[in-house]
Image (cartoon, helix red, strand yellow):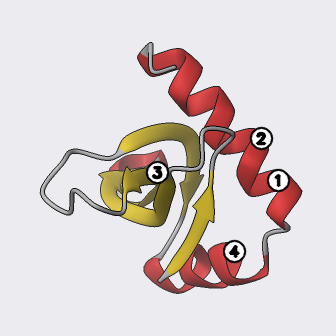
Amino acid sequence: MRQIKDGQGRTWDVVASDTQVAHRKRGRRLGFRLADDGSAEPVMTPVEFNSEAAADMAIRTMSEKELHRRLQWAKTDAGIA
């Protein structure tokens, strides 16, 4: 699992949650969960993947800058400082 730190120094796990994507197929959606609270619901982004394999590859290869941007947008949308 990949982790990143936000501007406040909190560590977040990068996750791919199960969701329904185009044509009612099962896929994954990019999200972030505080690393010290594994039972918390992830903060989700609008980024969807057609499969678990595609999500895993994207998370592994996505740049730190892109992950930070996605995390910041997801936190803003969720009302998290």
- Say what amino acid the circle numbered 2 marks: Arg
- Say what amino acid the circle numbered 4 marks: Ala
Q: Which residue is mark 1?
A: 66
The relative height of residue 74 versus residue 34 in the rendered view (above or below) is above
Where disc 2 sits, the SS reads helix
Q: Are marks 1 and 2 in contact (CB under 8 Å)?
A: yes
Dot label at residue 58 = 4
Q: Which residue is mark 2?
A: 69
Number of callouts:
4
Q: Label 2, label 4: how many angstroms apart (C-alpha)? A: 15 Å
Q: Between residues 8 and 31, which one lies in front from this camera angle?
A: 8
- Say what amino acid the circle numbered 1 marks: Glu
Q: Residue 75, percent across and down? A: 52, 28
- Mark 1, mark 4: which one is toward the viewer? 1
User: At 22% from the left edge and 44% from the top edge, which residue is drawn?
Assistant: 41
User: At 53% from the left edge and 66% from the top edge, which residue is drawn?
Assistant: 50
Q: Residue 62, percent across and down? A: 79, 70
- Mark 2, mark 4: which one is toward the viewer? 2
Where disc 3 sits, the SS reads strand
Q: Residue 77, percent across and down? A: 52, 17
